[in-house]
Image (tube, rainbow, N blue to C red):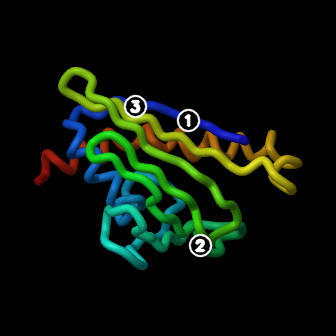
């Protein structure tokens, strides 16, 4: 498996962070390249919920990267699987309380079968860039909760 992960500390409680990450409609606020995200089926923020995500693709064309929540442990863990798009990634957010804040680890992995085993070294860089976007999350959540 090709994979990457990154961690940040958010100066908010775990439930605030968990609730924000669980709602896929928040993706455009902290992930660059996401044009839109909306609930396509299921109950928002629950296991089985599917989110329709449109991303910037090659030459500015839109690309689907829809995903489904596969596991959720309240305040601690969210796992998902991409179900439409150019790659079928799996990933998750793993939360732990640290002082008055919440440590968030974002992990992605791609299958190592067929074509993906051939491009794994190049693809690993793209995975790293995707998880590194987590750096934007603290500012977005902290600013949002102050404004509320």
Q: Do residues under tags 3 and 1 come within 8 Å of each other at their CB atoms?
A: no
Tag of residue 64:
2
| Rendered view: 145 above or below 80 | above
How far apart marks 2 and 1 lie (CA) works out to: 22 Å
Question: Is 133 displayed left or right of 119 in the figure?
Answer: left
State how far apart marks 3 and 1 are (Cα). 11 Å
- 116 versus 136 height, above or below: below
- Residue 69 occupies quadrant: bottom left
Identify residue for label 1.
5
Mark 1, Cα crowd under 10 Å, few <14 / some 14-19 / many 20+, is: some
Separation of marks 3 and 2 at Cα, in angstroms: 27 Å
Residue under the image location 53 percent in, 39 percent down: 132
* 99 horizontally vs 92: left or right: left
**Element at badge 2?**
strand
Residue 146 sits in quarter: top left
User: Horizontal and vertical percent for residue 50?
Assistant: 45, 70
**Location of mark 3 (residue):** 8
- Name the residue furthest left: 148
């Amino acid at each position: 498996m090709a994979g990457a992960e990154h961690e940040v500390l958010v100066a908010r409680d775990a439930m605030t962070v968990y609730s924000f990450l669980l709602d896929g409609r928040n993706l455009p606020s902290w992930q660059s390249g996401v044009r839109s995200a909306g609930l396509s089926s299921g109950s928002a923020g629950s296991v089985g919920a599917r989110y329709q995500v449109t991303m910037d693709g090659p030459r500015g064309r839109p690309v689907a990267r829809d995903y489904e929540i596969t596991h959720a442990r309240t305040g601690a863990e969210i796992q998902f699987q991409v179900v439409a798009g150019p790659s079928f990634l799996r990933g998750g957010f793993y939360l732990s309380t640290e002082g008055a804040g919440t440590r968030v680890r974002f992990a992605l992995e791609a299958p190592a079968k067929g074509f993906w085993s051939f491009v794994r070294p190049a693809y690993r860089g793209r995975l790293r860039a995707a998880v590194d976007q987590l750096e934007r999350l603290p500012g977005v959540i902290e600013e949002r909760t102050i404004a509320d």
